[in-house]
């Protein structure tokens, strides 16, 4: 993968295999999702995402497993938050340590280098993973990995490092599922585009011929597609039979009793469908609606009615509780006022005290019940 900043003396573009880096797919997915989320929040493709890289060091072999998000304010790291987050991450992911950080952009900028120097004050030898989400011409993953070092002239340099994408069996299942879902979404989008761009006279079925079977589909999508094709074929054949019977009834075709008997036998085998009148309508056919179907419908109707009745009773009990609460409060107020013969202002004060006492009492009774 070529580097954009060839003219920068601080960036070494030599492809030296001095280190072996393996990045798991979860890291790439998390970084992409982080940038996409910020892009939607701020409605800008220039949104900057910053996060840490979690992995393992084994000499010159580095394996990056996971990521976490960081808080950055005007290119300044919240170091207290980062240190606290690092300690929690180490407790959560046993055996993993912070090996670098990630961001997005076209290339390694001066701001990124300044950010890297701040990050290096706390963590030794961190790597930089840069996502370029706007690069639509590359044939590889839009990620670049850099490592920093100090040359013989005591000058800091950044060298691009090649990496491999490795995954364990559990990650393979998730990646395979995402790939299949992406294929289905792409095929669906292509079919929707062709629906609006087909030329007059071109069959829609023919235009979708090459799109109906993508390279990889999930089992659910394959099953639904097969069911759809089977139902569509059955519907077409039934339409042909209906047209034939209509033509026979109009006298356009001669009667063929053997063929009509076959059509009748086929219709008897079809699933029985409830008509628009329903099992309780005036035109109910007892030969179609057996006792089992009626029992199921009655049970469902009873469940719906019972749910509505319980909701009404609950609302009524709530109203009754509020009415009793007000009646009890007013009764206590009048009893207190008549007993002590207080004036209006004092009655109001007494009423408030009584209301508070009654409210506390009713709340205790409700909790106990």
Image (cartoon, rainbow, N blue to C red):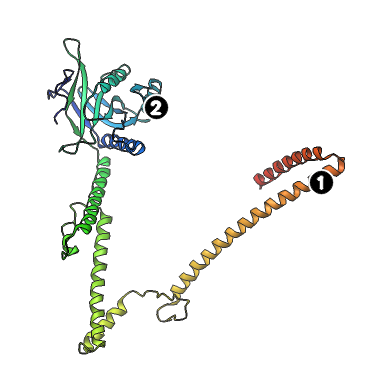
Which numbered dot is residue 88? 2
Q: Position of residue 155 (x, y in %)?
A: 20, 12
Q: Quadrant of residue 19?
A: top left
* Front: mark 1 or 2: 1
The secondary element bearing badge 1 is classed as: helix
- Secondary structure under the numbered disc 2 in the rendered image: helix
Looking at the image, residue 301 sits to the left or right of residue 314; the answer is left
Residue appearing at x 24%, y 56% in the figure: 192
Q: Position of residue 218 (x, y in %)?
A: 25, 53
Q: CA distance from mark 1 to mark 2?
A: 61 Å
**Residue 214, placed above or below residue 244:** above
Q: Residue at x 66, y 45 (%)?
A: 368
Question: Is residue 217 in view from this perspective?
Answer: no
Left or right of residue 346: residue 205: left
Task: Identify the residue under disc 1.
Answer: 334
Quarter residue 256 falls in: bottom left
């Amino acid at each position: 993968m070529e580097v954009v900043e060839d003219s920068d003396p601080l960036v070494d573009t030599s492809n030296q295999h001095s280190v072996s880096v393996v990045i798991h797919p979860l890291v790439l997915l998390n970084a992409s999702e982080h940038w996409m989320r910020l892009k939607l929040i701020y409605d800008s493709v220039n949104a900057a995402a910053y996060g840490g890289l979690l992995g393992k060091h084994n000499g010159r072999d580095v394996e990056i497993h996971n990521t976490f998000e960081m808080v950055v304010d005007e290119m300044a790291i919240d170091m207290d938050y980062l240190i606290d987050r690092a300690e929690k991450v180490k407790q959560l992911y046993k055996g993993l340590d912070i090996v670098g950080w990630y961001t997005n952009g076209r290339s390694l900028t001066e701001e990124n280098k300044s950010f890297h120097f701040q990050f290096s004050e706390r963590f030794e030898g961190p790597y930089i993973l840069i996502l370029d989400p706007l690069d639509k011409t590359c044939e590889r993953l839009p990620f670049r990995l850099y490592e920093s070092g100090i040359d013989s002239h005591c000058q800091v340099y950044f060298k691009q490092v090649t990496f491999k994408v490795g995954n364990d069996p559990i990650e393979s299942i998730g990646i395979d599922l995402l790939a299949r879902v992406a294929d289905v979404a792409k095929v669906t989008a292509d079919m929707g585009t062709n629906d609006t761009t087909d030329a007059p006279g071109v069959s829609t079925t023919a235009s979708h011929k090459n799109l109906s079977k993508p390279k990889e589909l999930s089992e659910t999508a394959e099953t639904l597609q097969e069911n759809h094709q089977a139902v569509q074929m059955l519907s077409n054949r039934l339409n042909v039979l209906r047209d034939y019977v209509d033509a026979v009834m109009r006298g356009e075709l001669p009667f063929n009793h053997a063929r009509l008997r076959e059509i009748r036998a086929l219709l008897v085998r079809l699933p029985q469908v409830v008509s628009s009148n329903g099992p309780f309508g005036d035109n109910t056919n007892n030969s179609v609606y057996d006792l089992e179907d009626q029992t199921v419908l009655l049970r469902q109707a009873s469940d719906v009615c019972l749910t509505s009745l319980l909701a009404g009773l609950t609302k009524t009990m709530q109203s009754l509780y509020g009415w009793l609460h007000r009646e009890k409060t007013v009764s206590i107020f009048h009893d207190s006022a008549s007993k002590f013969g207080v004036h209006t202002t004092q009655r109001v004060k007494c009423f408030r005290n009584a209301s508070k006492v009654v409210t506390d009492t009713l709340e205790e009774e409700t909790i106990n019940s």
